[in-house]
Amino acid sequence: MRNIVILTGAGISAESGIDTFRDAGGLWEQHRVEDVATPEGFARDPDLVLRFYDMRREAIQTKQPNPAHEALARLDRDWDGELLIVTQNVDDLHERAGAGRVLHMHGTHLNAWCTACDARTPWKGPMIDRPACPECGARSLRPDVVWFGEMPYEMDRIHTALRQADLFVSIGTSGAVYPAAGFVQEARAMRVRTLELNLEASQGSRWFHETRQGPASQLVPQWVDEVLGG
Ligand SMILES: [Zn+2]
């Protein structure tokens, strides 16, 4: 085994206290997804959307990586083969734990995207006051987060990595949101070994060769020990 592709989802960040739109009572519950996470919602009420993402951006900066993030960072550091951590999460907890080989398929809270010049700029502060783009000066920044109805980033690179993988591991994802939910079937079609680590059986569990259930903060360090020790 030389080549590992990992998909991470909300379940790995939940243990760091980052809620998702699927959590009952979570931040998203006070807003309809259509209002705060679609291009149409942004066009309709940009203040609402910018304020919502300002809150999310501020909140994630108060959270810390957990043992699952730390274990994947250790794998990234010590694994000599190919590795790609594809994350659906828009926080930076993989990076803050020390992982480098990370691809944010749904973008990141910590970038501003200028819709005038297409520049992406690291961004930690608010956008509600329409700050100027550092590149072109236009006041056209939006969160660099992929909304519903928009195309996830770097799909070609992800498909290529899946085709070349020896092992595909899905961590903390519901198996409900495409295209990520289809990665396991794509991997299976290429005879890639597949493993799921999730808190509970997911909608996609039946597609995996092996499924382990439990908290990511326990399962992921155990699995990384197996990979690096074996
Ligand atoms: Zn610009």
Image (cartoon, rainbow, N blue to C red):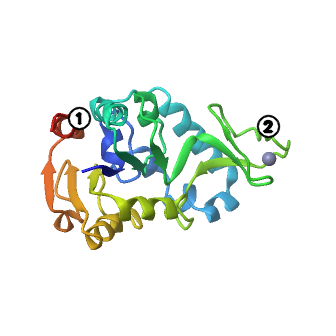
Residues 13 and 48: in front is 13
Measured from the top left, where is residue 101 in percent x and y? Answer: 45, 41
* Earlier sequence position, callout 1 versus callout 2: 2
Per the image, label 2 sits on a secondary structure element best described as loop
Assess mark 2: CB under 8 A from ligand 1? Answer: yes
Q: Is residue 130 above or below residue 124?
A: below
Residue at the spot 41% in from the left edge and 52% down from the top edge: 21
Q: Nearer the viewer, residue 131 or 191?
A: 191
Q: Is residue 165 left or right of residue 118?
A: left
The quadrant where residue 13 appears: top left
Look at 77% across and 38% down and name the residue there: 131
Along the line of sight, which residue is nearer the eye, 155 or 14? 155
Residue 52 in the image, given as x and y percentages of width and height: 57, 44
Q: Secondary structure at mark 1?
A: helix
- The reply to whether residue 176 is visible in this rendering is no
Seen from this angle, which residue lies furthest right?
137
In the rendered view, does 102 fall on the left or right side of 171?
right
Q: Residue at x 73, y 47 (%)?
A: 119
**Residue shown at 39% from the left, 38% from the top:** 18
Of the residues shown, which amino acid type is indicated by label 2? Pro
How far is the residue under mark 1 from the one under mark 2?
A: 38 Å
Residue labelled with disc 2: 134
Q: Looking at the picture, which amino acid does disc 1 mark?
A: Ser
Vertical placement of residue 52 versus 116, above or below? above
Q: Which residue is mark 1?
A: 217
Q: Residues within 10 Å of mark 2 (few under 14, many from 20)?
A: some
